Amino acid sequence: MIIKAYAKINLDLKILGKRPDGYHELRSTMQALPDLYDVLEIVESGETEITCSDKSLACGESNLCAKALALIGKKAKIHIEKHIPIAAGLAGGSADGAAVIYAFEGASDLAYEHAAKLGSDVCFSLMAISKQGKAAAIATGRGEKLEAIDPIKNKIIVKTPAISVPTPAVYKEFDNNPISTDGGNDLQAPALRLFPEIQITLDELSRTPDESGNLPIKVQQSGSGPSCFAIYKEDAK
C-alpha cells in the first residue's frame, strides 16, 4: 500500500495551562500542507523492517512507524520516501506514524484512539491523510481533540532554518515566562529567546513576495519551530 503522509502547520497556537499529566492544554488551528508529504510503502509482513530515503532518520524502535505497528499489533515492511524536513516542527514523524495506522485501520474510531495514544499531532495527521491533505481543524486538549474546519485557500510558503529546536525546551521556556499572544503563537517568543536565529527566517519570509509581487499578510513560526510560514492574500496566484 502506498500512502501520502502530509506535513502540517499551526496557523495559531495558544497555551491554556499545564495538565496534571505533564502535557500542556492548548488550542490551535492546524492546517495540512497538500504539496508537502512523505510517501510510505507499507507491506504487512512476518517481521518489521523500516527503511528511509533519508539515512539520518532513526528507523529503529524509536521511530513512530515502529511504535504505531507495536500499538496496533501488526508487523510490516515500511519504506519512507522522506520529503518533510526532520525535526522541523511540521509533524513529519507524526504523519508517518498516522500513515501506518491508516494503512491497517483507515480513519475509524479505533484508528483515532490509537492515534491519540501515539502522539499529540497524530490525530490531525490521520485526518489529513483521510482528506488527501485538504484538511484543517481546531485542535484542543493536548492537540488530539479535533473540530474539522475548512482550510484557508491562501497561498502559504514554508521555510525551515537548518537548526534543531527541542520542543520540550521551548515549552519549558514558556512555563518560565508564560506570556500569551492574541491570535498568534504563544511558543514563538520562547523559541526566539532560545534560538534567536529563527528571526532571520521570519525576516526573510517578510521580504518574500508571491508571483504577483505581493508581500505576505502574516509571517509566523509554526508550533515550537523552527519552521516558519508566510501567508499571502487569498486572491494571490
Image (spheres, rainbow, N blue to C red):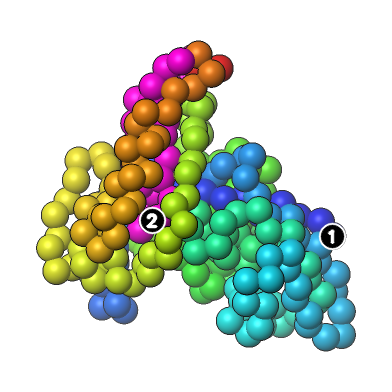
Question: For mark 1, does the 10 Å Cα neighbourhood hold few (<14), some (14 to 19), or many (20 or more) residues?
Answer: few
Residue depicted at 67% across the width and 77% down the height: 59
Residue under the image location 21 percent in, 67 percent down: 173
Q: Residue at x 12, y 63 (%)?
A: 177
178 above or below 184? below
Which one is closest to the eye, mark 1 or mark 2?
2
Say which of 100 and 49 sits in front: 49
Q: Looking at the picture, how far across and down is residue 174, in whole percent?
A: 20, 63
Residue 152 in sight here = yes
Query: Is residue 34 one of those drawn in magenta?
Result: no
Label ID, residue 137: none
Which kind of residue does numbered mark 2 sit on? Gly
Q: Position of residue 150 (x, y in %)?
A: 50, 33
Q: Position of residue 226 (x, y in %)?
A: 40, 55
Q: Can you tell which quarter of the image residue 214 is in?
A: top left
Q: Which residue is mark 1?
A: 1
Q: Which residues are magenta?
A: 213-235
Name which of mark 1 and mark 2 comes first in the sequence.
1
Q: How far across and how far down the image is residue 2, in percent? A: 81, 56
| Residue 147 visible in image | no
Q: Is residue 120 left or right of residue 81?
A: left
Q: Amino acid at mark 1?
A: Met
Left or right: residue 26 compared with residue 53 = left
**233 is within the stretch colored magenta:** yes
- Image quadrant of residue 105? bottom right
Name the chief secondary structure element in magenta. loop
Whole-Å distance between the Cαs marked 1 and 2? 32 Å
Q: Which residue is mark 2?
A: 225
Q: Nearer the viewer, residue 202 or 108?
A: 202
- For label 2, the SS is loop
